[in-house]
Image (cartoon, rainbow, N blue to C red):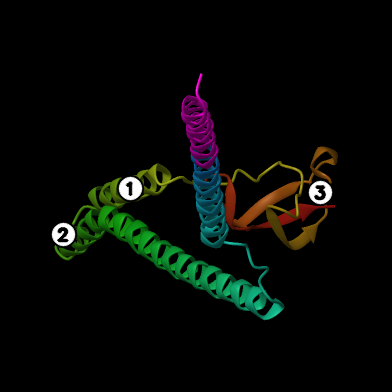
Amino acid sequence: MSQFHLLELSLSLTERYNLVDMKNKQTEENTENHEVNNQSDSTEVNQQETTEQIESVEETEIPVEPTWEEKFLEMNDRYVRLYAEFDNFRRRTQKERIELMATANAGILKDLIPVLDDFERAITYNETASEIDSVKEGFGLIHSKYKSILESKGLKPMECKGQPFDSELHEAIANIPAPSDDLKGKIVDDVEKGYLLNDKVVRFAKVVVGQ
């Protein structure tokens, strides 16, 4: 083989080596660029996550402990509101009680008006009456009607004669020697009747007690 052919073969091999070397370098460069791009993407993702975490922390409200002055103002406001509600309740209850008493009195007076009418008619009749028995009968009927109305409202008289003296029910106005031994310490006579309204004393009985 001539020197010219050897030289040509040598150049051909050198070019091939250079070509392979260039391909290897290009592959390395591509690999490095890919790694750089991956690192860049990873860095951007980390930065985005960090930003989101910071924004989340900023959005989260950290509870602040109120000061003593704020606590005092809050308690004072609650007290004022509670007092106002209680005062309104007290006034409303008092008004309802007054209205109830007025209504109750109106009901009793309405029932007593017919008794007043009977008295007026009896007085008119008595001006020309000649028979005393009819007058007595008329007043007896009026008394019975009046008494039944009071009893329907819960009022009833006390039965005192022969009962032991009780300071919770009776008021002794006199002490006399007992007519018999079984009346000692007991009521001999009731000067003024006592009355109970639904078993509650509305008037004490004035009595004479035997000694």
The residue at the point 84 percent across, 45 percent down is 184
Tell me which numbered mark, 1 or 3, is placed earlier along the sequence. 1
For this rendering, which residue is in front, 108 or 159? 108
- Residue 178: mark in rendering: 3
- Residue 140: mark in rendering: 1
Tell me, yes or no, whether the highlighted magenta stretch contains residue 54. Answer: no
Is disc 1 in contact with disc 2, using a CB cutoff of under 8 Å? no
Q: Main secondary structure of the magenta part?
A: helix
State left or right for residue 190 relative to residue 36.
Answer: right
Question: Which residue is under mark 2?
Answer: 125
Q: Residue furthest bottom?
A: 69
Is disc 2 in contact with disc 3, using a CB cutoff of under 8 Å? no
Question: Taking the image as drawn, is residue 193 in sight?
Answer: no
The residue at the point 85 percent across, 52 percent down is 211
Q: Secondary structure at mark 2?
A: helix
Q: Secondary structure at mark 1?
A: helix
